[in-house]
Image (spheres, rainbow, N blue to C red):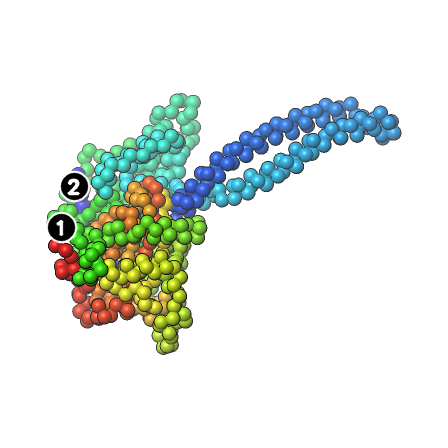
Amino acid sequence: MKLWIQLIPWGLCLGLALSFDIESGYNFHMFENFGQTKEVYIQEKELISKLKTYREKVIQIRDKLETFLNRSNGHDYNDETFTENPINTYILIKTHGLALPRMQLIHEMQELKRDLNKSTTNFPTTSDYYGALYGLVTLEDTYQFNTTLAAQGIISLPKFPSGQRVSMQSPHRMTYIDLKKMADLAFQKAWYDTSILFLKGAFNLIADLPEHEKPSNETMKKFNLMKQSLVRLNNQYITKKLIMADSTYKVFPFTIDKNMNEKVKQPKVIRDNIITYVNLNCQSGKEFYMRSVCNGFSFKGYTRPVKQFHCHWLHHQDPFLRLGPLKLEHVSDDPYLVVFHQIFTDTEMEYMVDTSRPHLSRTRVVGMNKGTVAHDFKGGKKRRIVSKSVQHWMNDLVYEDMKEDVTEVDNKWNYTVASPVLWKLSKKLEQATRLNLTAKYSSTGYQVTNYGLGGLCEVHIDPHGYLDGAELPPSRYHLRKTGDMFATIMGWIEKEPIGGATAFCYPYKEVLVWPTKGSAAFWYDLNLKGSRNIHTNHGGCPVLKGSKWILNKWVYYFDQYKRYPCRLDQTAVPQGFKRDAFYR
């Protein structure tokens, strides 16, 4: 079957919101916190050892209690004169005297229980469990691995978009109950196609079970009712709405039979290839489109050949860089996107990771945070801040007397070097990008972000849209003094994960940039009039294996006026690095 290349243009969302809270975004809790899950794995080993000790203590107490009960059986508790007899009194004292070791054991048990409670303080919660379910559902929805094989501990993707073959195996197995819960979650999100895949996997596992382990008739009745609902929803939406992914649902681009398999004979509307692939008017459609790009989808692949770019030695006519030029990969013209390879030293990368690791938050940070990216919210002049995974901010320089009020005069020169490592890095990035990064209002600090399993960033455009008339919340009043985000520097500072690409997903201009340790991507976010370049719409693809560490630094507009003066032409965009900046 052919792929559909029709789409609904970007614009105002006319449909209803999805059934889940879009404000919460992709929050997988502990599942995406690689550092914390690793810590829990280590703590679990210690916990097993302590539980074995706990079991031995319980056995000792049981034995002591049996001895105590046996010794007490001869006491006549109905005799009020029992303790008047010296023999009786002796036996009573003897019995409880020998019970003292039991009391010591109980004391030890209480200490052990306190130790166990302390050891499990950071263990997963119910929220973490459902976050892990959501993480696996999102990974399957993005990379489309076989759910039945995944339940057997195997994830195999022979044609991964990066060009590598992905194969992972686990000694652990999932049950049909696990797959059913994932099907339920996908159903709740209105991702009916993904729900069908998980439910089919659950049915496959049930078919292989011995008779005595199969679910009850009542449970199978519920499974079959859900199957019937999914078949009906998928077929009705695709044949009546003629859209694969809309604001309120996502389905297969074909009709399915009662066993949830693609029908051999499809309706005429599907045979004629008039199905719209995605409605980009709504946030849910944009998110699905981004995940599709993460898995290699591109509209431009069906309209024109993709231009091949080359690598260069970059020197900018700078005498220092002529002796040690930078390795530059030209990725895209529109949006203009390049990658500086091997621009970070090991010392710089280790410093950023080691400094950030103790300060990383447990889950995503949602709200108006310094330097975080933004995109349209409700189609108006307001902006919604995109939540990132666990993150930490660091500064190279700390200036005195930072003022957000544009009418106030302040001292632009007094500063303290907060980090010599980051200050030297900023000067190096200034040489590479030819932008001002170290003036008082020229750029943000360094944001170090860790994406664990499933970790991703929603589709967005980095600038706020201040010069386009977007409302400024109090936390962004500083943009009146700095200007909007003119350019983005995004670097990878740890070993490459599987997945975790950055997907630029404006229709017909799709680009995937894969993590490369020690390298940094660079692109311009604004045109020369100061308006947002919508072609830079992008998001972070989910991590399938491992962990992704990146740094972000956003460059502000006003301090770049010498090299990039304001132009009134709305179509004028920064031209990037000229040919005389390279060795040929």
Q: Quadrant of residue 198?
A: top left
Q: Which residue lies at the image location 59% right of the left edge and 29% below the top edge?
A: 56
Q: Is residue 241 visible?
A: no
Disc number placed over residue 307 in the picture, else none: 1
What amino acid does circle 2 point to?
Lys
Disc number placed over residue 2 in the picture, else none: 2
Q: Residues within 10 Å of mark 2 (few under 14, many from 20)?
A: few
Q: Secondary structure at mark 2?
A: loop
Nearest to the observer: residue 33 or residue 437: 437
Pick whichever of labels 2 and 1 is earlier in the sequence.
Answer: 2
Is residue 248 rendered to the left or right of residue 47? left
What amino acid does circle 1 point to?
Lys
- Quadrant location of the C terminus? bottom left
Q: Secondary structure at mark 1?
A: loop
Q: Quadrant of residue 135?
A: top left
Q: Which residue lies at the image location 13% right of the left edge and 50% below the top edge?
A: 307
Nearest to the observer: residue 507 or residue 561: 561
Tell me, yes or no, whether the two marked residues, 2 and 1, touch with CB atoms within 8 Å: no
What percent of the width, then of the height, locates residue 330? 18, 53
| Nearer mark to the viewer, of 2 and 1 | 1
Q: Is residue 438 visible?
A: yes
What percent of the width, then of the height, locates residue 1? 17, 38
